[in-house]
Image: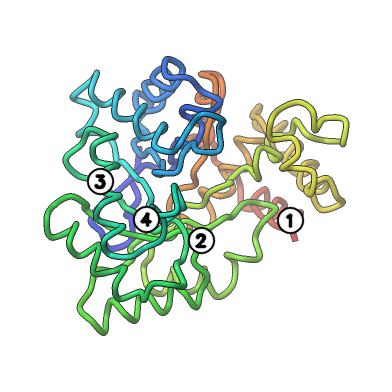
Amino acid sequence: MIKRPLGRSGLEIAPLVFGGNVFGWTADEATSFAMLDRFVDAGLDAIDTADAYSMWVPGNSGGESETIIGKWLKKSPGRRDSVVVITKVGAELAPDKKGLSAGRIVQAAEDSLRRLQVEAIDLYLSHFPDAATPIEETLKGYETLLRDGKVRAVGCSNYDAAQLRAALDASAGGDLPRYEVLQPEYNLYDRDSFEGDLRRLCIEENVGVIPYFSLAKGFLAGKYRSHVDLGKSVRGSMVEKYLDDKGMRILAALDQVAAAHGAKPAEVALAWLIAREGVTAPIASATTLEQVDSLINATRLELSRSELDALTQAGE
């Protein structure tokens, strides 16, 4: 499978990232192990998680996803050399565990390394911008981790164009580490926050892009087509906003292209993202082996220019 570079980091990944937000939430440990095995055996190699996953689940406090990934890596030692581990710092885990101060970043990395049972995090991301901490201090925290070999590359998530520009300027002006990757929300429906200045900046500065919510919280899989469908899963309340004229146009276009290829709407939606200018590899999660197989199929689906254009126009 052809690998794509993550900015100037020297890291390369296959064109789809497994979203680990489900581990310890809607996927138990055994299911998580089986899905990761299937994903990596297919030639895919990047796993995205965060120290905050999955603290929203009653009884969890954060770190559950990293712990499951660590156990999976430990049980099959050879796996570590074939996967790119991506995790994040900055979400509030407790009143004294939040933000992007240098001290917080270094301590959080140690905690993540322990849970992941690895010597280094391949890609470490600022989960959210931190207005209370100067970007220079944040980057100095990453400098410490890079110098000590505990992190291989750094990036950011949820930064807008101005915030990313400021970070890149601080890196260049202060001889500090550079954000090599951006993780934005981006999919066929949610496009405004990335397309435009932010995408142009990423392309101009060679910043890798790994979008999250690639399937619009599950809406682009096609199982939510009316308000009656919202009760089908725990995510139902999150997709109600997509049940409008634009959403229906997108589903119709997905259905048409999927039928032409004998594929599923979710596979087509991911294939559109994979083909999108400026995108390195979208993130998508799964809770069953069947869904993992569908993710794999998406990486092998080749859409024509007319199909890609039709999908793009449906979401405008």
Q: Where is residue 30 in the image (x, y as percent from the top left)?
A: 42, 15
Q: Distance between the residues labelled 4 and 3?
A: 10 Å
Quarter of the image where one finds residue 219: top right
Q: Which mark is residue 161?
A: none
* Residue under pointer 1: 315
Quarter of the image where one finds residue 302: top right
Quarter of the image where one finds residue 145: bottom left
Q: Distance between the residues labelled 3 and 2?
A: 20 Å
Q: In this view, does 188 lie above or below 179?
A: above
Instruction: Give left or right: position of 75 versus 256.
Output: left
Residue type at mark 1: give it: Gly
Which residue does the image show at 43% across and 38% down from the upper left? Answer: 62
Which numbered mark, 1 or 3, is in the foreground of this view?
A: 3
* Residue under pointer 3: 121
Q: Which residue lies furthest to the bottom in this view?
A: 173
- The foreground one among 62 and 263 is 62
Q: Which of marks 1 and 4 is nearer the N terminus?
A: 4
Q: Distance between the residues labelled 1 and 4?
A: 29 Å
Q: Which mark is residue 158?
A: 2
Residue type at mark 2: give it: Asn
Q: Distance between the residues labelled 1 and 2?
A: 21 Å
Q: Distance between the residues labelled 1 and 3?
A: 36 Å
| Secondary structure beneath label 2 | loop
